[in-house]
Amino acid sequence: MRDIRFVGIDPSLSSTGVVILDDRAKVIHQASIKAGKEDDPLRFMTLTAKVRKQLNPETDKVIIEGFSFGSKGAGVSKMYGIGWTLRIMLEKEGFSWTEATPSAVKKFGSNKGNAKKEDLVLPVYKKWGFESTVNDITDAYIMARIAYSMYNQDDLLTYEREVLKKVKKI
């Protein structure tokens, strides 16, 4: 179990949150990664390259947030572009990865699958003592905790166990 790192990735148009936990659930890295000003799809590729530099396929168990299928607007196609570019990189580079739906992430962090992003800050702080002013980092932290909890199931709450049953083991 030593040397395993648990990674959460929250893709977003404005920035992609990445949080890495060690084998004791201690945060060893957190970042809000922004893409450059390039035109798409080069912007997706640049963002993905920046995320890739944070990761190690030999040690990392990665959870990436699934697509928000109910979202609408001009940014949706860009979100799919970013999301798929990241997933292709994870697959091509041989990472152990899976995805958690947005509602699973929210439920694991707050016991409310429909919580707003800003409503996750306090429950996450109360549960784990983690605090960030960046929503994408808070979500990435929850995903890293999901990955960690797949391998460390001591003291999990009932709703956390329910979420783990729905997320494929990595």
Image (cartoon, rainbow, N blue to C red):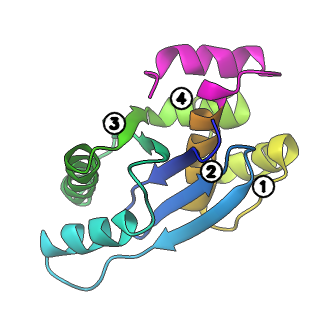
Q: Which residues are magenta?
A: 149-170
Please report contact status of discs 2 and 1: CB closer than 8 Å, yes or no.
yes
Mark 2 in CB contact with mark 3 (< 8 angstroms): no
Q: Is residue 168 above or below residue 58?
A: above
Residue tagged by mark 2? 141
Q: Residues within 10 Å of mark 2 (few under 14, many from 20)?
A: many
- Disc number at residue 130? 1
Q: Tell me the quadrant of the picture where the C terminus can be found.
A: top left
* Mark 2 vs mark 3, CA separation in Å: 23 Å
Which comes sooner in the sequence, label 2 or label 4? 4
Give the mark nearest the N terminus, 3 or 1. Answer: 3
Please report contact status of discs 3 and 4: CB closer than 8 Å, yes or no: no
**The magenta stretch spans residue 151:** yes
How would you rate the neighbour count of disc 3 (Cα within 10 Å): few for under 14, some for 14-19, many for 20 or more? few
Instruction: Say whether residue 149 is left or right of residue 45.
Output: right
Dot 3 amino acid type: Gly
Determine the secondary structure under disc 3. loop
- The residue under label 4 is which amino acid type? Ala
Compute the Cα span from label 3 to label 4.
15 Å
